[in-house]
Structure formats: structure tokens, C-alpha cells
Amino acid sequence: MERQSFIVRYFGFREHRTNLKTEILAGATTFLTMAYILLVNPFLLGKEAGMDFGAVFVATALASAIGTLLMGVLANYPIALAPGMGLNAYFTYTVVLGMGVSWETALGAVFLSGFIFLVLTVTKLRELIINAIPPGLKYAVSAGIGLFIAFIGLKNAQFIVPNDATYVSLNPNLLKPGELLTLFGLVLTLFLMIRGLKGAVFFGMIGTAVAGMVTGVVQVPDKIFDAPPSLAPTLMQMDIMGALDMGFFAIIFAFLFVDLFDTAGTLVGVSNQAGLLKNNKLPRAGRALTADSVATMSGAALGTSTVTSYIESTAGVASGGRTGMTAVTTGLLFLLSIFFFPLVEAFASVAAITSPALIIVGVLMAASLKEIEWKDLSEAVPAFLTVLMMPLTFSIATGIAVGFILYPLAKIFAGKWKSVHLIIYILAALFIIRFVFLGSM
């Protein structure tokens, strides 16, 4: 009773009109909505980028737990964190596979982005930067990442295949067992989402796995529980000195930019839904951003890509979560998940199970397209090319760079150069220098 009394006081249950049971159920709901990352992230970083699969799984679970527990205990917000979708794909396909950068150096870049994020938070420069970036570019980056993720999902599922004449085309044979299972998973997940089921993406993956085992496409795991695999292959393997090379400016900036605005947007969105904003301001914002940056650095040290706040936290808020106890519950469930490695090992390597999740998440992120001012060409053109260049160049950093270069130019041509913050001009110049002297990103 005393322990519960302490929890009630610490998290402020009475002020937020909630209770322990509600917070625990909300935390479990949040976990189910984002548990898909436990399968998708090891697939992207482990199977695709060449890192140790088991170590990446443990790093994903631990980094998610650390970030989420910090958010709950330090900032007292019902917000969960995990390796960010889009940034894990950028880490794998653009940085490691596309640019030939070692995953150790890529982890070093992730760590540096988290450190810079922490410095910006401590020195209060984060507000200046957040306010300097035009809303149109923020929306375009989110939508572009959505298209990028969806394209990867379609490619991994073999829906989209190489074509000498048109570069890519639709696979002429979609009646193979793997492709049919992917279609089933996509339709099942779509149905669950439309019906409003909490954790639809996660349950869609589980349903697809079950269907795959019944039809013989997916191997039945030998067991469900087991001791977690070793973290040693990725623990403290990041190469920070290698990432300090000038050629990694765009990589570090991409990690930092997306994390900064994903986190800021998620904090405001979730807090607004939970009624936690006061005078349109977010109390304890510094603590929340500190939790996010420390989680990213911890994740890099453990062996995973950028950890960021998840918009899926709104599911927990919708279930009544109002305090950090919701996040604490989610974090503890992430810790518990490390003992379910046999299931992840059996399912995560099957593209038919992970690809529908990538496509659906891409659709959700592309929703920000509606916020762009399409009737204003000085807004529409930079935004459109930001979105388009990400999947076409297979690089989030290139899409961001194109947008930041074109935006101030478009505003100058429109006679609105004074509306562009000095920071944008500086970033545009840096990206131009990066293109000229170091080639594409």
C-alpha cells in the first residue's frame, strides 16, 4: 500500500485523474501498437545491414526500454520510445549498403547526432532551430520518409523488381507463396486498422506469421521463450572517430534533423491529446528531450539506430494513459520481450511478415502531405522534390538536402527572402558545399 501510495504521489495520479490500473492498461496498449519494431528493426539492421541479428534484437529492446523508462520517470509523460522507422531504413540502405559505410561508423554517426541533440537541449538552442525550419519542409520530410519506407517494403516483398527499361516495375509473377502471403498480411493489417483495433500492425504481423506456418511458408519456431542472445557483437562497437569525418556531415544531420522534429512533433501531439499542454506550452519539455537524446546515445552504444519518440503513444493516451506510469509499463514490457527471441528469430527474417508493416507505416507517415501549401509554388516545389528525391535516390539525407537548398532559392525568387531564417541559408550553403566537394549523399 505504501509503494502504491508513493507511485500515486510521484506520477500525480490525482492531478491527472487516473489510477494505476488505467496506466498499466494504457502502457500495455502502447507496447502492442509499437511491438512491431522488435521484428522490423532486427530485420533491417541484422539481416540487411550485416549486423548480428540477435544482438540487434536485444539492443532494440533495451534501448526502447531505457528511453521509455527515462521518459516516464524523468519527464512523467505517457510517451514511449524505440528505434525510429525511416531512420533504421536510412541507416541500412543508404548509409551502410548504399554508401559502403561500416555499421560501426554509422553507429558512431548516430551517437554524435544524439550528443548534438543533448547539447541543443541543454543550451536551449533547440527552440531556435525548431522555429527556424519552415513547416512545409517538416511535413515534406515526414511524408518523404513514408514513401521511402513503403518503397523498401514493396521491394523486400518482391512486389517491385528491377527492370532494365524502366529501372523498376511490378513483379509479373505475384502468385508465388511468399508474395501471396505478403498480400494476405497487407490486407489483414489494413482490415484491422480500419476496424480500429489497437496494435493492428503488430497483430497483423502475428496473423501473417500464423497463416505462413499453416501454409508451410514460415517455419514453425522450436520454442517461444529462451534466454536472450549475447549483446557482445554490437555492444560499444560504434566508431565515433570515423564518423567525425567531414563526409559524414549530411549523415549526422539527417539523423539529428529527423529525430529532432519527430520528437518535437510527437511530444506536442501526444501531450495535446492527453490535455497536458499549459498555455500552449509543454511543461518539462527539456526533460523529455533529454530522455530522447540519452536514449539515442544509449542505443548507439548498445547497437541500434536512432531512438525517438513514437506517435503510437497516442494509443495509450486514448486508453486513458496520462502519466509517466504508462511509459514505465511500456518500458518494462520491452525489457520482458528479450526472452521472446525464438519468435522474433523465426518471423523477422520473413519479408512477407515485415513488409506489410513497412508499407502501412509509410502510408501513415505520408498523411502529412495534406499540410503542405500546394497553391504556393515557393512552398510546393521544395516540398515536392524533398518527398520525391528520398525514394528515387534511396536517401533521406539527399531529400533533406534538396529541400533545404531549393527552399531559400524559391523564396528569393518569390521576393520573400526576408521570411527565411538565417539558419536555413547557412544550412543551404553547407549542403551545396557538400554536394560540390563530396558528391551525392
Image: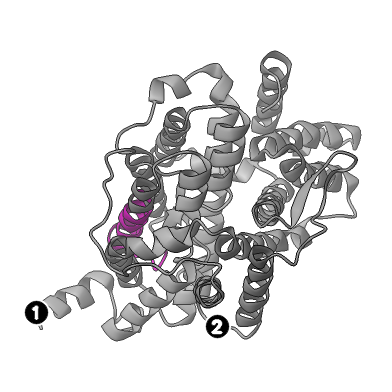
| Quarter occupied by residue 52 | top left
Residue 259 can be seen in this image = no
Q: Position of residue 63 (x, y in %)?
A: 35, 51
Q: Is residue 389 left or right of residue 358?
A: right
The dot on residue 77 is: none
Q: Position of residue 2 (x, y in %)?
A: 9, 79
Identify the residue position indicated by label 1 in the image: 2
Disc 2 crowd rating (10 Å Cα; few below 14, some 14-19, many 20+) is few
Question: For mark 2, what is the residue?
Answer: 197
Q: Residue furthest front?
A: 216
Q: Residue sitting at 65 percent across and 36 percent down?
A: 397
Q: Is residue 368 placed above or below 120 in the rendered structure?
A: below
Q: Which residues are magenta?
A: 59-79
Task: From the viewer's side, name the closer residue of 139 and 434.
Answer: 434
Task: Tell me what residue is drawn at x 65 percent, y 40 percent.
Answer: 396
Q: Dot 1, how many residues are within 10 Å of its Cα: few (below 14), some (14-19), or many (20+)?
A: few
Q: Which residue appears at 39% of the width and 54% of the height? A: 288
Q: Is residue 378 above or below residue 311?
A: above
Question: Residue 68 magenta-drawn?
Answer: yes
**At numbered mark 1, what does the secondary structure look like: helix, strand or loop?**
helix
Mark 1 and mark 2 lie on one chain; the one further toward the N terminus is 1
Instruction: Give, as a three-letter code, the residue at label 2.
Output: Leu
Q: Position of residue 289 (x, y in %)?
A: 42, 50
Where's residue 244, x and y in %? 46, 21
Q: CA distance from mark 1 to mark 2?
A: 36 Å
